[in-house]
Image (tube, rainbow, N blue to C red):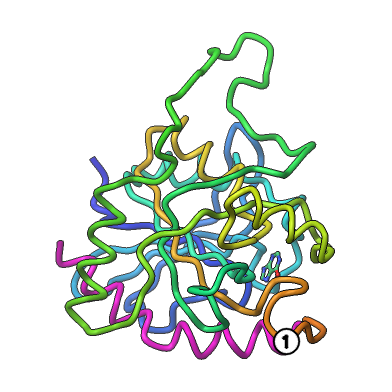
């Protein structure tokens, strides 16, 4: 068993965790190729934590080109049992305005053409994992409890709609997603969550609302500056939350 208590996959706007101490860097290679970035392993509140930047540390890998299989296989090879995925998202429904942090409980996958399973290569095992509840209930509960302990506002539900990107959505696409039951829209929630389930990794998502989704809010143009500024503000107390999660 690995002594890594938690791995964090950081999304747009989160390329490192400055609070990590005594950081060691591991360059990994896997059966599925190279992950997006080296794994930074350090300590937070005395617990060992691994961090990987999903898009690369210089944000060079777009959502549809992320080697999700290599990223998760690498963490699994390091003995990681729990992954907290941090994803910048657009907010669709009223509870999810910019800078809100959510812990979604459901997913709808609108992505296509991504390598989304370990059952891809000839001869690989055919996997039909149960995905009724796509996120780990225990890890979700830990996050919500930790947020409550530090009095951090957090929304404990939400359906994450995963789109292909890299472009943002049209108003009509978001209208359809709202009709489908999506509260949040992002480009990286899948296939990551499904692969984690195939690998037997406990996985939950911390969704950082960076903007109102297309046609929501005041309908203003969505800019990268806005996205990054909101992610930066919303993640300011992330180390505190992580420390609290790690106590459980
Ligand atoms: N749509 C898709 N992905 C996103 C968005 C969005 O509005 N904001 C941040 N990631």
Residue 234 position (above or below residue 137): below
| In this rendering, position of residue 237 left or right of residue 16 | left
> Which SS does the magenta portion mostly show?
helix
Where ligand 1 lies, by image quadrant? bottom right
| In this rendering, position of residue 75 left or right of residue 181 | left
Residue 182 position (above or below residue 154): above
Q: Is residue 229 inside the magenta stretch?
A: yes
Closer to the camera, 95 or 2? Answer: 95
Q: Which residue does the numbered mark 1 point to in the structure image? A: 218
Q: Quadrant of the N terminus?
A: top left
Please name the residue shown 24% across and 57% down the image: 141
Q: Which residues are magenta?
A: 224-248
Please name the residue shown 79% across and 86% down the image: 220
Closer to the camera, 118 or 2? Answer: 118
On the image, the x and y values in percent for residue 238 come to 38, 79
Q: Is residue 94 inside the magenta stretch?
A: no
Neighbour tally class for label 1: few under 14, some 14-19, many 20 plus, Cα within 10 Å: few
């Amino acid at each position: 068993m690995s002594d890594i208590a938690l791995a964090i996959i950081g999304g747009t706007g989160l390329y490192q965790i400055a609070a990590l101490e005594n950081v060691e860097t591991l360059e990994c290679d896997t059966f599925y190729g190279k992950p997006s970035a080296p794994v930074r392993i350090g300590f937070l509140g005395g617990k060992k934590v691994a961090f990987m930047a999903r898009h690369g540390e210089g944000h060079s890998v777009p959502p549809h080109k992320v080697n999700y299989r290599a990223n998760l296989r690498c963490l699994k090879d390091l003995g990681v049992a729990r992954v907290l995925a941090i994803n910048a998202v657009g907010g669709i429904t009223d509870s999810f305005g910019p800078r809100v942090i959510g812990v979604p409980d459901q997913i709808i996958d609108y992505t296509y053409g991504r390598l989304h399973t370990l059952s891809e290569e000839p001869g690989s095992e055919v996997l039909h994992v149960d995905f009724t509840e796509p996120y780990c209930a225990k890890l979700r509960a830990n996050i919500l409890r930790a947020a409550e302990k530090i009095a951090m506002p957090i929304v404990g539900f939400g359906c994450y709609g995963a789109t292909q990107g890299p472009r943002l959505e049209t108003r009509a696409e978001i209208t359809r997603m709202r009709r489908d039951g999506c509260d949040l829209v992002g480009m990286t929630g899948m296939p990551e969550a499904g692969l984690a389930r195939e690998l037997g990794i406990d996985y939950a998502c911390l969704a950082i609302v960076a903007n109102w989704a297309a046609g929501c809010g005041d309908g203003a143009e969505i800019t990268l500056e806005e996205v990054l500024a909101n992610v930066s503000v919303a993640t300011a107390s992330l180390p505190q939350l992580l420390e609290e999660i790690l106590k459980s």
